[in-house]
Image (cartoon, coloured by chain):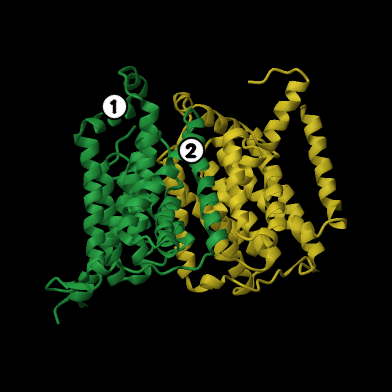
Amino acid sequence: MTEIFGIPLAALMGQLMLGLVNGSFYALMSLGLAVIFGMLQIINFAHGAMYMMGAMFAWIAFVHLGVGYWWSLLLVPAAVGAIGIVIERSLLKWIYKLDHLYGLLLTFGLALIITGGFRYVFGSSGQPYSIPPALAGAVDLGFMFMPKYRLWVIVASLFVCLFTWYMIEKTRLGAYLRAATENPALTQAFGINVPVMVMLTYAFGSALAGFAGVLAAPTTQVSPLMSSNMIITVFAVVVIGGMGSIMGSIITGLGLGVLEGLTKVFYAQASSTVIFVVMVIVLMFRPTGLFGKEN
Amino acid sequence: MSATTARLGYLAALVLLLLAPAAIYPVLIMKVLCFALFACAFNLLLGYTGLLSFGHAVFLGSAAYLTGHALSAWGLPTLVGLAVGTAAAALLGLVIGALAIRRQGIYFAMITLALAQMMYFVFLQSPFTGGENGLQGVPRGSLAGIDLSNDYALYYLVVALFAAAFWLILRTIHSPFGQALKAIRENEARAVSLGYDVDRYKLLAFVLSAGLSGLAGALKVLVFGFATLTDVHWHTSGEVVLMTLLGGMGTVMGPVVGAGVVVLLQTELADKVGSLVTVIMGALFVFCVLVFRRGIVGESVALYRRMIGEKTR
């Protein structure tokens, strides 16, 4: 059997691919955070709860309404986005003028309400969500067997990430968005409805998290607790990448996922902390993060 | 309020505290005191320096674990055990603070949170912490021949240490150092231009706050006899923010009041509503941020000032 550094190649590749899958989730999540932060200047602590809601909604839709995976992939992000709109209109819009810290605190409270509510109704035990039949089984990549579903996760999230990047960096709508981020008052004066854009941005960011949640549902136990560690890890990813660029969050997310996967092969005990260790190292040399700009 | 009235007020509070075990279960008051100290230490950063550390539970928890380990595995005397925990938390504060103060505002909050989470995993996997089960059966030991396993004996030790720590915080706030911290909170750029070494002040405040949070954690492990992952979990970090916010950040008594309300709410509600406690805490959070930003003490002071016709800012 082929080995690298005494590790079987198949195991190494397996963890590498698993890392890419995790990295896809980190990328989707930190991208959503970055989009929301760019427009609202709020670090959305409720982002993990949105992710959890995505997975829970997919499970509820399947068990209680018979809605399958593919419809969920479309409908659930829309539903989470709609909840985002309600949250933005009813709560967030009151605090834009305050210190940014209040945004963090408010969304932290929201995260507690959402996760606590789901735990109250559904309990905290994990629920299985089966892989859609079309993506069951594995493909032979030559060096390893890769479950089709994991490949799909990587492809789907990369597609969504790059689509978001394209929308923001290359289209007219994205140009408005960036203008509104730079100077809301001036953009408003040009006849662009900034409050509506803010609202839609929050909805879109939430929808991204919801999408990640549906994608994650078949790969994990669906439960109200799944948001807890995810959000902190994504915060670390954001600190490492710096909130500067959309592409930055995609690259950092994927890269750190891979790194985490590789650590699992070489020194498994460190796999849950490696991202934080990287954060410490990056902070020592680049306090603004890898792609961050000093503001 | 003049300084004399304030001093009389603290004295009255102390007397009440000394008499309280006659009416209330001492373990409950000790729990409140531990969290009140934790919140006061946290408020030193958030309320007086303007730094939102979102990972402060790591200092509470580290001290709890280390004190617990020092008492049960090494068999150290109680006071030495407390000192070990407190010093460890202060040291950890030095490391985390030095890294975190390089960024401001929400980034500072995220970094402290992420570093605390890293320590969470360290405690989860370390051989001495008992993993998911936590550290159990920590002995209280004795002090000057008095057996501390008696709740009342321990109570007076906790009150004495709480009062000492509270006094230290009070002195800090009213010292030139405290004034410099407030200047940093109000306008960091100006403090820099006035020649203050802002980073050193911030770091010093961070270490002090971490050490005092550690003392709170060390006392907590004495009171309950165990340390668990809950002590280092970020939910606990969130709770101390809530206590401070609810009581009134930047006020001396706010964190004490906030800690009392939150601890009592939790003890009262825990077995009645189950996981709804989280929802209630979250709602309290949202409420405080939206309409009650000055907190109970802050709003009361503002109300009092309006009543006596004093102009508020």
Say whether disc 2 or disc 1 marks the residue closer to the N-terminus: 2
Amino acid of disc 1: Ala
Q: Nearer the viewer, residue B48 or B298?
A: B298
Please say whether residue B34 is visible from this viewpoint. Answer: yes
Host chain of mark 2: A
Q: Nearer the viewer, residue B97 or A217?
A: A217
Callout 2: SS: helix
Residue at image mark 2:
A103
Q: Position of residue B246 (x, y in %)?
A: 64, 41
Please say whether residue A16 is visible from this viewpoint. Answer: no
Chain A drawing hue: green
Q: Position of residue B83 (x, y in %)?
A: 62, 59
Residue at image mark 1:
A179
Identify the residue at image location x=35%, y=21%. Answer: A188
Amino acid of disc 2: Gly
Callout 1: SS: helix
Identify the residue at image location x=46%, y=60%. Answer: B119
Chain letter, yellow in picture: B
Q: Quadrant of the C terminus of chain B?
A: top right
